[in-house]
Amino acid sequence: MENKACNCKLHPQSMCPAFGGLRVLMRIEGAQVCMVADQGCLYGLTFVSHFYAARRSIISPELMNIQISGGTMIDDLRNTIETIAANPAVRFIPVVSTCVAETAGIVEELLPKRVGNAEVLLVRLPAFQIRTHPEAKDVAVSSLLRRFGAFGEPRKEQSLVVLGEIFPVDAMMIGGILQKIGVKSLITLPGGDMDDYVQAGRAEACAVLHPFYERTASLFESAGIKIIGGNPVGANATGQWIERIGEALDLDPEKVKQVADEERQKAREVMAGFASRMHGSVIVAGYEGNELPLVRLLLEAGLDVPYASTSVSRMPLGEEDHRLLTMLGTEVRYRKYLEDDQAAVLEHQPDLVIGTTSLDSFAKELGIPSIYYTNNISARPVFFASGAASVLGMIAGLIEKKEVYVRMKEYFKPTV
Ligand code: SF4
């Protein structure tokens, strides 16, 4: 049967949003998540959290019809919090409330703020309010900052918060380069230490790497902390990003320019090294909310990207990328459906798809090379020259293997 895009728009478009919050909260040292969720949701979220978060267990009060209709939900939750807090190693209990519990109604005032050694914080993550898992990360980070950030204390000079989940090598690269230009203190959020959230309130500026951290950015802004947009992906943006940080923190302009020029040049040289292999078209269709900088890198390297999509909505912090990408001919689809992505694959017949698992299966059946965005892009460095080398090397290799996918399709073609 010919592979056709379906128009029903009923397929799941993203994973459960609460997962994004769990990724942030479960990774904090001394934290034990207490989740108020239907048993089915709890099963699924425990499963993905072991895979993609901190490999820790989630503790939950039982929440079935009997608890909801019997009106014991809050008492059960309070008892569970007490039980968790009895462990002296637990210093923080994030209470994650999801769809069913939120529908039944959780009154924050009926929960303790602290039990024994442990701070207790309610984080509401129902899918009917928080549409995607990237946005749930924003809710978790902003809730932590609102409660624990030391916003009232004196600012630390030349201190910066870098906001956005990044690959560990990228974090190290950022640290090294910012130290060269004179940044004295650097905090990366989401962080693994509660103190990161406390000290973040004393920073002078915050570099927001991903556009969906809207709530967190506006919280920082309202506390007088400068917001810096963009990220060091590709040659032009890398130089610009370093210069913006220098300006926001009032660092030595000569030193900043020198480092920005060096890093810009290094990234350019990497791209020049791949120039002869950068031919073809790529569709980028993730659900992480950080897809547009990758598209920018591919366009800068000489590839054609006719279509890119993401699960988040169009946001002011992503506007710069939006303008550039659309000017260069990329159709950008926000709050996308799988069906939009499938139609784009059929229309553009790209040489490579970097997509969600469902889209990848669809593209492979058409004989088009395709890889999973989350496992291949979010799990490798993308910043500065080294990130460009890592991403472009992988993409060049995949485009060059296009013939293998066509042969594979032929091989599996039914003979009768
Ligand atoms: S019902 Fe809500 S909490 Fe449960 S899996 Fe679906 S989106 Fe997640």
Image (cartoon, helix red, strand yellow):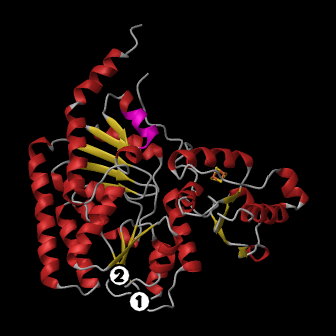
* Residue 84 forms part of the magenta stretch: no
Q: Between marks 1 and 2, how big is the CA–CA gap?
A: 8 Å
Q: In this figure, which residue is indicated by the disc labeled 1?
A: 155
Residue identifier under label 2: 159
Between 155 and 9, which is closer to the camera in this rendering? 155
Query: Magenta span: helix, strand or loop, mainly?
Result: helix
Label 2 Cα crowd, 10 Å radius (few <14 / some 14-19 / many 20+): many
Which stretch appears magenta? 356-363
Q: Amino acid at mark 1?
A: Arg
Nearest the camera: 278 or 164? 164
**For the residue labelled by badge 1, is the local secondary structure a helix, a strand or a loop?**
loop
- Identity of the residue drawn at 88% across and 62% down: 71
Residue 263 spot, x, y in % from top left: 15, 65
Where's residue 110, x and y in %? Answer: 79, 74
**Rendering quarter of residue 18:** bottom right
- Looking at the rendered structure, the secondary structure element under dot 2 is strand
- Drawn side of residue 210 relative to residue 384, left or right: right
Q: Position of residue 145 (x, y in %)?
A: 53, 76
On screen, residue 127 above or below 40: below
Any part of residue 231 in sight: no
Q: Quadrant of residue 208?
A: bottom left
Which quadrant, please, contains the C terminus? Answer: top left
Q: Amino acid at mark 2?
A: Ser
Q: Quadrant of the N terminus?
A: top left
On the image, the x and y values in percent for residue 189 come to 44, 68
Are the residues tagged 1 and 2 within 8 Å (C-beta)?
A: yes
- Residue 87 is left or right of residue 64, and the answer is left
Q: Is residue 326 above or below residue 316?
A: above
Return the residue found at the far right. Answer: 70
